[in-house]
Amino acid sequence: MRKAIAILLLFSLSVHCAGQLGIAASWWLNQDYIARVLCINRDRPQLKCNGKCHLRKQLKAVAEHEKKQQPSSKQVFPEITLFCVVAAPLRVSPPAHFTTPLRYATYRVAHYAWDRPGPDHPPAEG
């Protein structure tokens, strides 16, 4: 069942994409008939149209049809206001732990390389 659906979808996509190819193939197979009967320039053989005018007309019609089916890139959507915010004065006060002084705070003094009096030396052998 899945295989049949996959084949059907593949076929439908290929037919949609191959519309102009099908028209060109039909023109190529029926070129003699189109040149004799349907060609606009059949009375003027010096132009050597051979039905290309009919092919051009069909391809133009397919292109216009596809262009009409494409959605418009400029769609206007109505504006809807979801939230209404009233500007009010903003009062900011610091949190309580910033206003009370810290008690019994101990700090550990870090010893960095630039605090040492001399250059670094490897350990001496004993």
Image (cartoon, rainbow, N blue to C red):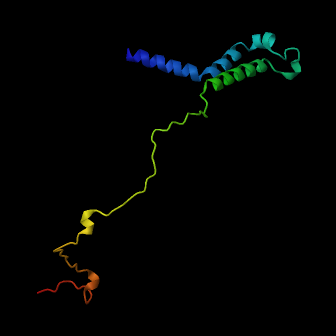
Dividing the picture into quadrants, the one containing residue 58 is top right
Name the side, left or right, on which 80 lies relative to 66: left
In the image, farthest residue toward the bottom: 117
In the displayed structure, would residue 89 be above or below residue 102?
Answer: above
Q: Report the residue at 63% width, 18% height from top.
A: 22
Left/right of residue 80 with respect to residue 26 in the rendered view: left
Query: What residue is at 88 percent from the left and 17 percent from the top?
Result: 44
Instruction: Residue 4 in the image: state x and y as whole percent.
Output: 42, 15
Residue 97 vs residue 50: left or right? left
Viewer-closest of 10 and 109? 109
Q: In this view of the protein, which residue sits in the foreground, 80 or 90?
A: 90
Instruction: From the top left corner, tell me how far across and down residue 125 is, in percent.
Output: 14, 86
Number of numbered discs overlaid on the protein picture: 0
Q: Quadrant of the C terminus?
A: bottom left
Percent x, y for residue 67?
65, 26
- Position of the N terminus by quadrant: top left
Q: Is the residue 85 above or below the residue 54 in the image?
A: below
Q: Residue at x 21, y 72 (%)?
A: 102
76 to 49, vertically: above or below = below
Indicate the position of residue 119 as horizontal and vertical percent values. Answer: 27, 87
Please report the residue visible at 78 percent of the width from the left and 17 percent of the height from the top.
Answer: 51
Name the one closer to the observer, 98 or 71: 98
